[in-house]
Amino acid sequence: MKRAILVGLLVALCGGLAAAGPLKVVLVSGSGEYKSAESLPTLKKYLEESYNAQCTLLQAQDDKELPGLEALDDCDVLLLFTRRLKLEGDQLERLKGYCQAGKPLVGVRTASHAIQTWLDLDKEVLGGNYHGHYGGGAKQQVTLVPEAKDHPVLKGVEPFESDYSLYKTSPVAKDATVLLMGTTPKAEQPEPAAWVREHKGARIFYTSLGGLKDFDCPSFRQMLVNALFWAARRDVEPKAK
């Protein structure tokens, strides 16, 4: 009897894990300045080969066309990396509807001004305060906020350098938990470089990092992986080797 009960519990547990299936990620690319059309396909490949994830990559055709947004209806988490798209009509409403319905979102770099026709996305959803950036030409030093070092998004993340300009993001929303700070010799002060918050019950992550070379950095890449699973309220699930 005990053996039968144990077997039943194991079957139920394994069935529950199987039912979860892969993390369904929609990656939205449209940041020409930072070459998201190169970095996001690489991230898609990495996620699908290394983790229990299934990705749909949507690429903006120009600054007014982003086909395929119906994929948002059936995803676990959205990663947004576009810059000043001028979406209108159904495409804009689909994206707004996803965010305003309280669904998880991971924003990368220009996501703070992802949609020119919906700039309120930054403050309303991401909890940010983008107002320009410091000049380039000097490496950005990225450090972990000591009080946040044990946050799940920072697991396996170490301080690193970025070749890209530091965004002016402070002050961020009061309910945001800042995870990373960035500074350069040109900066007047350190600036929040990554943070998390909740919006309408959904977990939100944003980082002002995300230039093409950042995706080659193991700590940056790990942070994005962690953020996607965390936002979807799932543990990070590496693929068995």
Image (cartoon, rainbow, N blue to C red):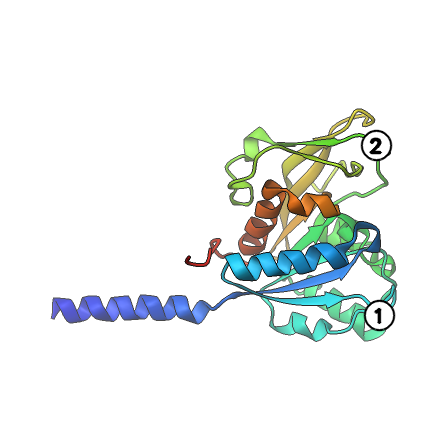
Q: Which residue is mark 2?
A: 137
Q: Single out the mark in the foreground, 1 or 2.
A: 2
Look at label 1 and name its amino acid: Glu
Characterize the local packing of mark 2: few (<14), some (14-19) or many (20 or more) Cα atoms within 10 angstroms: few
Query: Can you name the residue that lies furthest to the left here?
Result: 1
- The percent position of residue 129, horizontal first and vertical second, equals 78, 43
User: At label 2, which amino acid type do we have?
Assistant: Gly
Residue nearest the viewer, comparing 1 with 31? 31
Tell me the quarter of the image containing the N terminus.
bottom left
Q: Residue at x 86, y 56 (%)?
A: 84
Query: Where residue 233 appears, x then y in whole percent?
Result: 51, 56
Return the residue at label 1. 65
Gap between marks 1 and 2 measured at Cα = 33 Å
Is residue 175 at all visible to an observer of this figure? no
Say which quadrant the C terminus sits in: bottom left
Q: Secondary structure at mark 2?
A: loop
